[in-house]
């Protein structure tokens, strides 16, 4: 298996622009998580899906952030409009019930908003 | 609400020596899992070791072992015979019912 796939790996954009981050979970995994990592705040859970349904989005910072999972093999995290304080590494992770709850992480997307 | 605390932002250890990273957590649940993840400079998150809360025996994976004290809600990671490749950020994580909480991490330096 190729593991969790994220794209792009790096994104540089200007303040005010829309940013879309993409994730393909491991085939067969039914839960998907989006995290944000910064030096100041560490690793924060933004939202997670179970069987394509958003279960907990309490970590989403504000209305500028939205996430979708239209099918079991694809999810997006969108920021519109982006701001410099959104600069961070965004991770996607997936898991399958029964795997002792281990999460498999993607390589992350490093977002820089100027 | 569950919390995970790693009280050591940074630690250093001499190569070949042993180091222990501490982690405490707070929960009212009885069924949960605990993990240690490693994040090297490549930033890829790698699972190091896991512990089921219902198991009293401490988990071990080669040079990595944990000291799980359920009553004290403590879950420390011991790395024996430290190697240069062990240099990384280490995150302690708690998980139950499909939700996972990470500590702030401990940056481990290996001194040659």
Image (cartoon, coloured by chain):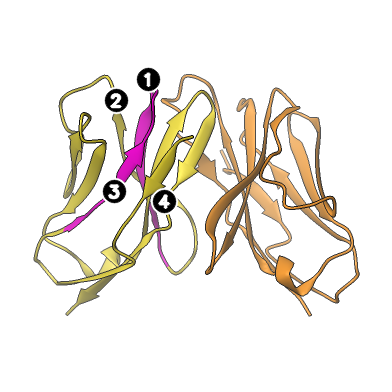
Chain colours: A orange, B yellow
Dot 3 and dot 2 within a common chain: yes
Chain identifier of the residue bearing label 1 in the image: B
Label 2 belongs to which residue?
Answer: B53
Q: What's the distance in space between the residues labelled 3 and 2, CA to CA?
A: 14 Å
Density class for disc 4 (Cα within 10 Å; few <14, some 14-19, many ≥20) is many
Q: Give the residues drawn in magenta, as a range.
A: B20-40
Q: Which mark is residue B23?
A: 3
Mark 1 or mark 4: name the one nearer the start of the chain.
Answer: 1
Residue B101 image offset from top left, x and y in percent: 48, 41
Q: What's the distance in space between the residues labelled 4 and 3, CA to CA?
A: 8 Å
Q: What's the distance in space between the residues labelled 3 and 1, CA to CA?
A: 18 Å
Q: Which mark is residue B86?
A: none
Q: Compared to B52, does A19 lie above or below?
A: below
Q: Is residue B47 visible?
A: no
Q: Which mark is residue B31?
A: 1
Q: What's the distance in space between the residues labelled 1 and 2, CA to CA?
A: 6 Å
Secondary structure beneath label 2: loop
Q: For this view, does A81 lie left or right of residue A48?
A: right
The answer to which image quadrant residue A51 occupies is top right
Mark 3 or mark 2: name the one nearer the start of the chain.
Answer: 3
Secondary structure beneath label 4: loop
Label 4 belongs to which residue?
Answer: B103
Residue A72 image offset from top left, x and y in percent: 74, 28
Q: Compared to B101, does B33 lie above or below?
A: above
Mark 4 and mark 3 in contact? Answer it, CB < 8 Å: yes
Q: Compared to A38, does A67 lie above or below?
A: above
Q: Is residue B56 visible?
A: yes
Chain identifier of the residue bearing label 3 in the image: B
């Amino acid at each position: 298996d190729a593991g969790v796939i994220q794209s792009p790996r790096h994104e540089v954009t200007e303040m005010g622009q829309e940013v879309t981050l993409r994730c393909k979970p491991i085939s067969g995994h039914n839960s998907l998580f989006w995290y944000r990592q910064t030096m100041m705040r560490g690793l924060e859970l933004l939202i997670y899906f179970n069987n394509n349904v958003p279960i907990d989005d309490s970590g989403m910072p504000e209305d500028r952030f939205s996430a979708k999972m239209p099918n079991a093999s694809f999810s997006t995290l969108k920021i519109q409009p982006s701001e410099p304080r959104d600069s961070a590494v965004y991770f996607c992770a997936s898991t399958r019930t029964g795997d002792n709850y281990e999460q498999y992480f993607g390589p992350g997307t490093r977002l820089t908003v100027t | 609400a569950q919390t995970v605390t790693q009280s050591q932002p940074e630690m250093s250890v001499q190569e070949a020596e042993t180091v222990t990273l501490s982690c405490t957590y707070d929960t009212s649940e009885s069924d949960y899992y605990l993990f240690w993840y490693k994040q090297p400079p490549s930033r890829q998150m790698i699972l190091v070791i896991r512990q089921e809360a219902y198991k009293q025996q401490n988990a071990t994976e080669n040079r990595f072992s944990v000291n799980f004290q359920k009553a004290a809600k403590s879950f420390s990671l011991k790395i024996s015979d430290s190697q240069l490749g062990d240099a990384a950020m280490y995150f302690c994580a708690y998980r139950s019912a499909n939700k996972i909480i990470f500590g702030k991490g401990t940056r481990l330096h290996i001194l040659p």
